[in-house]
Amino acid sequence: MIRAVTPSLEPIREKVEAGERLTAAEAESLWDPAIDLHELGELANLVRERKSGNLGFYNINTHLNPTNVCVYRCTFCAFRADLREARGYVMSDEQILARGREAVEAGSTEMHIVGGLHHQKGYDWYLNIVRILHDAYPTLHLKAWTPVEINWFAHLTKRSNRDILMELKDAGLGSLPGGGAEIFHAEIRDKICEHKADTAEWFDIHRTAHELGLRSNATMLYGHIENAFHRTDHLLRLRELQDETGGFQTFIPLAFHPDNTRLSHLAKPSPAMSLRTMAISRLVLDNFDHIKAYWIMLGIGTAQASLAYGADDIDGTVRHELIYHDAGATTPEVLSVDDITRLIREAGREPVERDTLYHRVIRDGTAWRASEPIRVG
Ligand code: V47
């Protein structure tokens, strides 16, 4: 009689316990649903604990999407609008500064800024957003523009990525968010976001940012038309650049939300898939300090569970999020500090407010200062 062999985690467990790096084949094998999810989570939790002890990080942040009008038509995006569509908007300088003021008054340490690539707005409009916010609110860390925007600015101005990044940094750019990564493998990227910054550009821009002393994040959009091979390839490419520069701070797996997108016929990834992705990310990205479970996109329950499946961060209080809410996210629009710290505590972790660069935040009401960088493992 032929018996199906249940794949075993044992050889991988031994390597992880010994602190050894997983090979591409080992990493890909972990996506097999026959690999027990809870055992996988336990292993990822071991790595998380070595890196962050019992700490669960969050920050106080505000989002700004200055326009949703975009020249690109990524199939997964519900946020973008055409130039003449009624739902298209462009924020004025006054509205942008009002958002900055609201952020500071709410105690935010960070503003997360990404947006559409407006057909009629030049690079100077985007540069000016960084400049006016930084000039008015110098303590607010501006985590702004993904490689998709930087590449667009380079295209518009015929200048190099380095030149653009240097100018943005001089104007007050603090770091780069992780977006625009989607799935790096061309088999998928060409189908979901054919025209925007390609994989080589995405990596060149992060490498250059790191060389200029800017830290950045990385993401992966999963649960649409990609498979285990593409997800593994994505993680390994990130691990390689991190070996070279050490400039990434945190990795954020992003669960695809299909509502109002051109992929609305697809099902949303299940919580089990999200927990598996979290755990595998933690195990493969051995050179990333942090894995973030972005509660807006995962939902609060899965974000809490993720803190036992490899994640050590659940992002921030988040005001004014649009990208996920346009795509059907049913999470609240904002969480209070009391809510977010309770969620982290209930998940068995000690909540720690961090700033964007992972310094502990010492607070007196809305006034704050960054203390020492957080180091555990
Ligand atoms: O690049 C867009 C994704 C990203 C959908 O760096 C979608 O701290 C799922 O990068 N379903 C932008 N995902 C968001 C992002 C991010 C978020 C939070 C924190 C950080 C950080 C970065 O959102 C895009 C794309 O991959 N996205 N539409 C959708 N329908």
Image: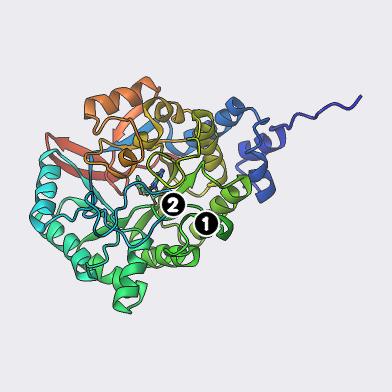
Residue at 7% x, 55% y is 94
Where in the figure is residue 103, as x and y percent of width and height?
15, 43
Q: Are marks 2 and 1 in contact (CB under 8 Å)?
A: yes
Q: In the image, which disc is placed on residue 154?
A: none
Evaluate whether residue 212 shows in this view: no
Q: Which residue is mark 2?
A: 75
Percent of width and height locating residue 260: 37, 42
Q: Name the residue located 11 percent from the left edge and 60 percent from the top edge.
A: 135
In this figure, which residue is indicated by the disc labeled 1? 191
- Amino acid carrying label 1: it is Lys
Q: Amino acid at mark 2?
A: Thr
- Give coordinates of residue 287: x percent, y percent: 51, 49
Q: Is residue 123 above or below residue 349?
A: below
For the residues marked 2 and 1, what is the alpha-carbon distance in whole angstroms? 8 Å
Q: How is the image coloured?
A: rainbow
Taking the spot 44% from the left edge, 64% from the top edge, the residue there is: 195
Left/right of residue 328 with respect to residue 103 in the rendered view: right
Q: Residues within 10 Å of mark 1 (few under 14, many from 20)?
A: few
Residue 37, quarter of the rendered image: top right
